[in-house]
Image: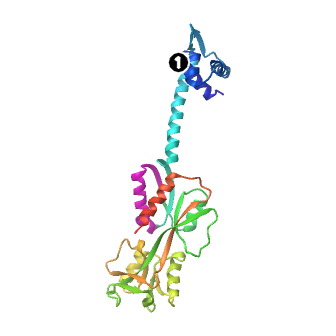
Amino acid sequence: MLDVRRMQVLRAVVGSGSVTAAAGVLGYTPSAVSQQIAALEKEAGAELLERVGRGVRPTAAGLLLTEYAEAIGRQVAEAETALADLVAGRIGRLSVRYFATAGAGLVAPAVARLRERHPGVRVDLKLTTDAGDALADVREGRADLALVVRGADQPPENGVRRAPLLDDPYLAVLPRGHRLAGRRGLRLAELAEEAFVGSEWPGPCLDAQLDACAAVGFRPRFVVDSEDYVTAQGFVAAGLGVSLVPRLGLGSRHPGVVVKEVRDPVPVRTIHTLVRDSAPPQAALDAFIDALREAARP
């Protein structure tokens, strides 16, 4: 096999026209340069240089290898530049898992910020409905980052690093003609006797609602399980009950409902980022997480 470093020595000799001149350029002794050329000729199985007066010129084989050495030199330089850009976060590719209501309010503005600051970074997005799938994708290296909802009492997941990103408060959604619709805000206990329209699948989001209600002494009486924020608003508008919907889930509001802030206590779901514990540092990933945090600020 041809030694690439020796090919670069040959290139220097051919370019300068003599072994002595090449030695000066490379910082070697003339003897060391001659040894490198002799070893390369042995690898090539052909003479690469011929003497001309006090200098040398390439043979046909020497000229051929010099041309390839130049091409290799350009590719190495390009590789060094690309590697520096990757390490600095100027280029790269990220794979991100997210859930629906985090898309418009968090992921979209974060991707826009990243694209503006680091246009060479590509973000591959995948919507997931199962937090377990998103966790597995991160843990097994199929995704660089996932957004999930986790409760404060949930234990850490093995193999991943979890960090809080945003506390997303639940708001009360009432029919327009409801007795409390004219109020500026509500205490959660004032909804204790109401019929409830469910808006969440069983899991940490629903737990956030139930825990807040339990703290003031009641459990919601669900008359409809919609498990969808838009559908829940439709049932509320029809007068079937009230609902609790997170702020990020109210990007589209039904004209037949009013939305009120809830206090004492405020039901809150917490959105976290998940990254793999063993993942090497990535400047592009750090930049994207910074962009997510900016999007999460009020």
Local SS, label 1: helix
Q: Is 138 colored magenta in this rendering?
A: no
The picture places residue 171, in percent across and down from the top left corner, at 41, 79
Instruction: Provide the major secondary structure of the magenta segment.
Output: helix
Quadrant location, the N terminus? top right
Q: Which residues are magenta?
A: 100-124
* Residue in view at x 31 percent, y 78 percent: 255
The picture places residue 156, in percent across and down from the top left corner, at 61, 69
**Quarter of the view holding residue 14:** top right
Mark 1 burial class by Cα count in 10 Å: few <14, some 14-19, many 20+: some
The picture places residue 88, in percent across and down from the top left corner, at 50, 47
* Residue in view at x 68 percent, y 20 percent: 42
**Amino acid type shown at disc 1:** Ser
**Quarter of the view holding residue 256:** bottom left
Q: Is residue 45 above or below residue 212?
A: above
Q: Which residue is mark 1?
A: 16
User: Is residue 194 visible from the viewing direction of this image?
Assistant: no
Q: Is 117 colored magenta in this rendering?
A: yes
